[in-house]
Amino acid sequence: MTDAPHLIEVRNLVKRFPIDGGLFFRSSKAVHAVSDISFHISKGETLSLVGESGCGKSTVGKCLAQLIPLTEGEITLEGTRIDGLSRAQLKPVRKRMNVVFQDPFSSLNPRMSVEELIAEPLRSHDMARSREDRRQRVGDLLEKVGLPRESMARMPHQFSGGQRQRICIARALASEPDIIICDEAVSALDVSVQAQIINLLMDLQKDLGLSLLFISHDLAVVEHMSDRIAVMYLGRIMEIADREAMFTHPRHPYTRALLSAVPLPDPEAERDRVVLTGDVPSPIDPPSGCYFRTRCPMATDRCAAETPALREMAPGHLSACHFAEQV
């Protein structure tokens, strides 16, 4: 965990998606995708967002990158608010913040060459003096992500999935950002290719001083590359801690259940498996109090009546559970 100043601050972020319906097609209900979450990312740090599919992880990433507007809350970049800015005002922000998406093939325009794809942010932010300068920068970026310079003349369909993701990373690096949001950036790849891309991201982070928001459902991957981890459930953060504390001393029943499901290298190793019952509640009509109470083995009447605050259990270790001391 780094002591560097905070690069990103997210305060009380709320994102709801209205559902059309009711009289005269007025919005009568909404999907509560993200519900009042706060966190920070320091310079050079990797913060991972983990949780089940549909818990709001990708929505947080899109709000952070200003791809969708916030319903409530605020986001600051080195102390300056970036939510609610106009398209022109966002241009310098987008130079400092880029995204690598889950599917590299759909992220790349199939009609553009690799050179055109990577040179696009260079042109957009006026970062090259001439065409020769752009070609030199594109070649350097390709070599930085482990691809030959000659690749710039080829089209996206001529590459494997892992190579296409390397192209996406090179494009994300082109504007020399401070932070890259990796939205399930390795989940669509084979395991061996996953390891290569993860090692590449870690090497680039070390060399360039990048910050990463790593969104994933794979705790084994998260353990390998995170400084801190935030666990989400139904749009809320249940627990935040550094990597070692999260994996050795989890303070929330949901975190314990997730960790107990991670496969172990030794098939004969004993473990305390936590099996959750029931289904994830609907984000249209979430439960009262603690969102996790309908599946929690420790739930009491208090959990239904009172929403647990995200409170500090140890330095840097926060848990949103009334009974965190007993977990």
Image (tube, rainbow, N blue to C red):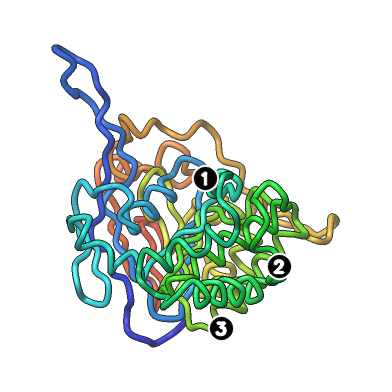
Amino acid type shown at disc 2: Glu
Measured in 3D between alpha carbons, the distance from the residue under mark 1 to the one under mark 3, in whole angstroms, is 29 Å
With respect to residue 30, does 20 lie above or below?
A: above
Between 30 and 80, the one nearer to me in the picture: 80
Can you give x and y, in whole percent of width and height, for residue 233 in the image? 43, 47
Amino acid type shown at disc 3: Lys
Question: Please, what secondary structure does the residue beneath circle 3 have?
Answer: helix
Question: Please, what secondary structure does the residue beneath circle 1 have?
Answer: loop
Indicate which disc, 3 or 2, sits on the residue closer to the N terminus. Answer: 2
Can you give x and y, in whole percent of width and height, for residue 76 in the image? 24, 68
Q: Are marks 3 and 2 in contact (CB under 8 Å)?
A: no
Residue where numbered disc 1 is placed: 52
Q: Are marks 1 and 2 in contact (CB under 8 Å)?
A: no
With respect to residue 303, does 325 lie above or below?
A: below
Residue where numbered disc 3 is placed: 206
Measured in 3D between alpha carbons, the distance from the residue under mark 3 to the one under mark 2, in whole angstroms, is 26 Å
Between 95 and 181, the one nearer to me in the picture: 95
Badge 2: residue crowd in 10 Å (few <14, some 14–19, many ≥20): few
Count of residue discs: 3
With respect to residue 53, does 149 lie above or below?
A: below
Instruction: Answer whether residue 216 is visible to the viewer in this image.
Output: yes
Can you give x and y, in whole percent of width and height, for residue 19 in the image? 27, 26
Between 278 and 2, the one nearer to me in the picture: 2
Indicate which disc, 1 or 3, sits on the residue closer to the N terminus. Answer: 1
Q: Residue at x 26, y 39 (%)?
A: 16
Question: Please, what secondary structure does the residue beneath circle 2 have?
Answer: helix
Q: Please name which of the two marks, 1 or 2, marks the residue nearer to the observer.
A: 2
Indicate which disc, 1 or 2, sits on the residue closer to the N terminus. Answer: 1
Residue where numbered disc 2 is placed: 150
Q: Are marks 1 and 3 in contact (CB under 8 Å)?
A: no
Q: Which mark is residue 291?
A: none
